[in-house]
Image: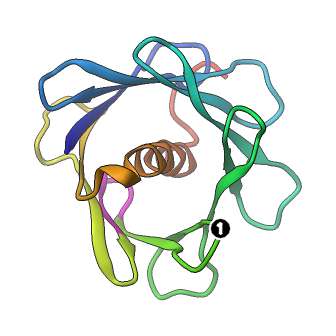
Amino acid sequence: MKYYMKQRLFSIGNDFRIFDENNEEAFYVDGKAFTIGDHLLFQDKERNTLCEIRQKLLTFRPTYIIREPKPGNQLAKIRKALMTFRDTFIIDVPGPNDITVTGKWVEHEYTFKRNKKVIATVSKKWFRQSDTYGIDIVHTGDTILVLASAVVIDIMCHKGRSNIR
């Protein structure tokens, strides 16, 4: 399934709108303003919270946690890998099926892989607008995790963006 993500450039906090291939809003990411560390709610189009994203503070390297809204079970921990020849993000999920993400972050060109198999690709090549890029997900069971992780990677790689924070 193909989605495209559009960041609201002039918003308080990090807000994103995610559209499906029919150009209909599928998800909304509500970045909470005036918090210590990033705090975002990943919501469906009716604004029901599907997961919560929080920046973990006081860590050696930037780390984000994705949790269920209630009871708050951890779905994933996202961080940059240490000591790799190229920038790599690790999405640590419960169990043995961690996801690695590699590519060109500034250009929004990267792939998500589980067990060396591509599960999603991110590309800006499909769009002219500076704040929009596409996400092609192979298995729909990975949709929320991949989209939420793409939001986190965007935030981690573009911290200096002009959003009011």
Q: Is residue 38 shown above or below 75? A: above
Q: Is residue 131 left or right of residue 145?
A: left
Using the rendered view, name the quadrant where residue 22 is placed.
top left
Region in magenta: 104-112
Q: Is residue 112 shown above or below 153? A: below
The one of 138 and 62 positioned closer to us in this rendering: 138
Using the rendered view, name the quadrant where residue 83 is placed.
bottom right
State the residue at coordinates (67%, 40%).
68
Residue 128 placement (x, y as % from top left): 13, 33
The one of 100 and 12 positioned closer to us in this rendering: 100
| Residue type, mark 1 in image | Pro
State the residue at coordinates (60%, 14%).
12
User: Secondary structure beneath disc 1?
Assistant: loop
Query: Where's the N terminus, which quadrant?
Result: top left
Q: Is residue 10 left or right of residue 120?
A: right
Residue 32 placement (x, y as % from top left): 68, 21
Q: Is residue 139 shown above or below 86? A: above
Q: Is residue 93 magenta?
A: no
Q: Which residue is mark 1?
A: 94
Residue at the far right in the pictured view: 58
Residue 71 placement (x, y as % from top left): 78, 37
Q: Is residue 160 shown above or below 114? A: above
